[in-house]
Amino acid sequence: MCAFSVFVQAASGLTFGVVPFVSKRSLGVIAGMTGCGGTVGAVVTQLLLFSGSRFSRQTSISLMGFMIILCTLPVSLLYFPQSGGMFCGPSCNRNWANEDTDSYRLLE
């Protein structure tokens, strides 16, 4: 259970670590959706695996671990042109340079 907890915390940190790279313009929205997604995922997992007597506790914990792996693996495929991804480097194309400038205003 301790190893499981370490990997769950690492997956959570990975998910929240991606938030600043998505878009500066909509950082608050992305952070809110990420936080809400974790809560909704916890409620759904509780309802599916632990609230009924369909699965034993050991089976439920194993299935929860499998769900965590399935939900975390796609994060390794994320690619940001400015920074690169897990499997490839940043893009040589400089069309994304406008995203970094602070010339935009949210409330104008």
Image (cartoon, rainbow, N blue to C red):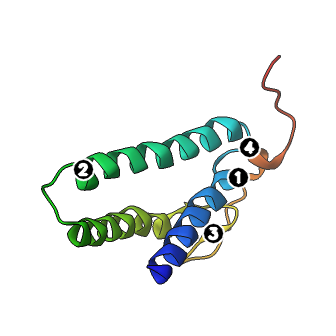
Q: Which of marks 2 and 1 is nearer the N terminus?
A: 1
* Residue 20 horizontal/vertical position (percent): 70, 52
Q: Residues within 10 Å of mark 1 (few under 14, many from 20)?
A: some
Q: Residues within 10 Å of mark 3 (few under 14, many from 20)?
A: few
Q: Earlier in the sequence, mark 4 or mark 3?
A: 4
Amino acid on which the number 1 mark rests in the picture: Pro
Front-most of 53 and 90? 53
Answer with the quarter of the image where residue 88 lies. Answer: bottom right
Q: Is mark 1 on a helix, strand or loop?
A: helix
Amino acid on which the number 4 mark rests in the picture: Lys
Q: Determine the CA span between mark 4 and mark 2.
A: 35 Å
Q: Residue 84 carries which label?
A: 3
Residue at 28 percent across and 72 percent down: it is 62
* On screen, residue 4 above or below 46: below
Q: Determine the CA span between mark 4 and mark 1.
A: 7 Å
- Residue that badge 4 annotates: 24
Q: Determine the CA span between mark 4 and mark 3.
A: 17 Å
Q: Which mark is residue 48?
A: 2
* Residue 25 horizontal/vertical position (percent): 72, 37
Q: Is mark 3 on a helix, strand or loop?
A: strand
Front-most of 32 and 91? 32
> Cβ–Cβ below 8 Å for labels 4 and 1?
yes
Q: Residue 20 carries which label?
A: 1
Q: Is mark 2 on a helix, strand or loop?
A: helix
Amino acid on which the number 3 mark rests in the picture: Gly
Q: Determine the CA span between mark 2 and mark 3.
A: 36 Å
Q: Which of marks 3 and 1 is nearer the N terminus?
A: 1
> Cβ–Cβ below 8 Å for labels 2 and 1?
no
